[in-house]
Amino acid sequence: MNRQKHFVKKCLNEARGWLQVNRTFLAEQARLWTGRLVIWFFGCLAGAVAVAFAFATDEITFLFIGATQKHPWLPFVLTPPIGAALLWITRNFFQGAEGGGIPQVIAEIGPRPDEMPWRPLISLRIAFGKILISLATVGIGYSFGRQGPSVQIGACIMASAERFVPAGLYVQRSHLLVAGGAAGIAAAFNAPLAGIVFAIEELSRSIESRMSGVVITAIILAGVVAHVSLGSGNFFDQIPRFGESPQLAIAVLVCALLTGLAGGIFARTLLLSASGWKGRLADFRSRHPYRFALFCGLLIAAIGWSSGGLTWCGGYVETRMLLWSDTALPWHFAPAKFIATIVSYLSGLPGGMLAPSLAIGAGIGQSLSPLLSDYAFSTTVIVLCMVGFLAAVTQAPITSFVIVMEMVNGYPIVIGLMATALIASTISRTLSPPLYSTLAEQMLKAQGHEKKADGANPNTTRQPS
């Protein structure tokens, strides 16, 4: 018994001595793991918020579509005035929530001129406004998606983790923004791999492309939350008809060429409307933004009514119909959705371009599928055009083909998806500079002009952001 007591006492003394010798090491490890747990927790939170945002967007879309089926005149009454009111709320209470969300995150990550006052584009207040107003815009028929806003929302949530991360972890704020933005993509599309690729290809252009494992784990955890909440299925479920053929290369070339041209024109139009747009209509938008929003709302209602309601909201229902149903949509679906999305963007309201881009691409694919029936299945042509148009708009070909591949489980045609995305993106570059990074640069310039204007007029007061 005494021998056992002596042994226990000896072990305790040795343990006490080891703790005293390694006190600094243990404190460092505790700080390190505390920081990791904080980042992982906020990664899960960003994924959960993105999933809740997705459910809410789908629900409000179905409510609006159902209401318009009973009352076709309803958009003419609701969309113009509510759109103008939402623009007023955005400008006066949620500055920084305008636009799609991805350019805002890129601008916040990128370097800024020294001594330039910066109106934040990332905060929990902005995230709240982004969710609220994005849901409302979709709920009144604007051709917007939820994925772009999810990027900014995820970045806002992850940025709030900075205050809780111990200083010894050496995680930069830019890394948290990248992780949050990628978490938003991963959860919104239920595609974790796409989130990681998006972080590296699109968001990491101005920082290190190789991030720490702890940040990547935060992105993966966001995707895990999405899988647990949404199930193991794909965004558009398993497409029933896929296949390779020796002639698939012809379908790839045709789809890439046409979607590259269409997507390049689409991106160029958005950039011109954001900066460099001149004429009476542009002057009217500058002088009377709320009246212009009323006009845009009226156009959205008219385009949707004339197309039988096909252009309202993000386009998920129409895209799924083209992939799963033998029922063909009217030939004018793609051009009508194209115009409705541009008009929605011109209004200045918050909303994303990714889901509408996929819908436009699917519409182009439906129109091409009869011409390419000897070279590929109709669903294959539709999916190729989806990835081609998305790659042409974003000029992020790797992200685009990974997103579509994960959404439709398109592994049998992965080479075709890659080729279409790369060719379409290359064609788009001849027509337009990169959409998101160019918009981010324009935001930096706009804030620089605000500084000069405030300096010239000392009585000018800036709206708090």
Image (cartoon, rainbow, N blue to C red):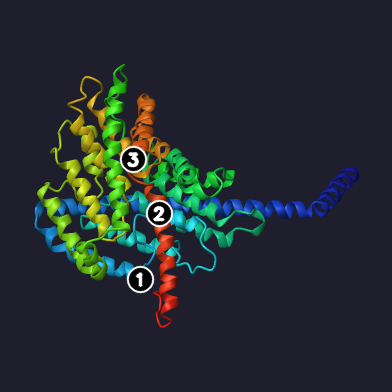
Question: Where on the picture, by quarter, is residue 31?
Answer: bottom right
Amino acid type assigned to the residue bearing label 1 in the image: Phe
Judge left or right: residue 180 versus residue 244: right
Q: Which class describes the residues within 10 Å of circle 1: few (<14), some (14-19), or many (20+)?
A: some
Q: Residue at x 71, y 53 (%)?
A: 28
Up-down: is 293 above or below 224? below
In contact (CB < 8 Å): disc 3 and disc 2: no
In contact (CB < 8 Å): disc 3 and disc 1: no
Q: Residue at x 36, y 32 (%)?
A: 423
Disc nearer the start of the sequence (3/1) = 1
> To which residue does mark 3 refer?
428
* Disc 3/disc 1 C-alpha distance (Å): 36 Å
Residue 425 in the image, given as x and y percentages of width and height: 36, 38
Q: Which class describes the residues within 10 Å of circle 2: few (<14), some (14-19), or many (20+)?
A: many
Quadrant that contains the C terminus:
bottom left
Secondary element type, mark 1:
helix
* Disc 3/disc 2 C-alpha distance (Å): 18 Å
Residue 293 in the image, given as x and y percentages of width and height: 22, 64
Question: Where on the picture, by quarter, is residue 263?
Answer: top left
> To which residue does mark 1 refer?
93
Secondary element type, mark 3:
helix
* Disc 1/disc 2 C-alpha distance (Å): 20 Å
Can the viewer see residue 37? yes
Mark 1 vs mark 2, foreground winner is 2
Judge left or right: residue 135 versus residue 1: left
Residue 364 in the image, given as x and y percentages of width and height: 22, 36
Amino acid type assigned to the residue bearing label 2 in the image: Pro
Amino acid type assigned to the residue bearing label 3 in the image: Ser
Check residue 103 in the rendering and tell me which mark sits there, or answer none. Answer: 2
Disc nearer the start of the sequence (3/2) = 2
- Front-most of 50 and 268? 268
Disc nearer the start of the sequence (1/2) = 1
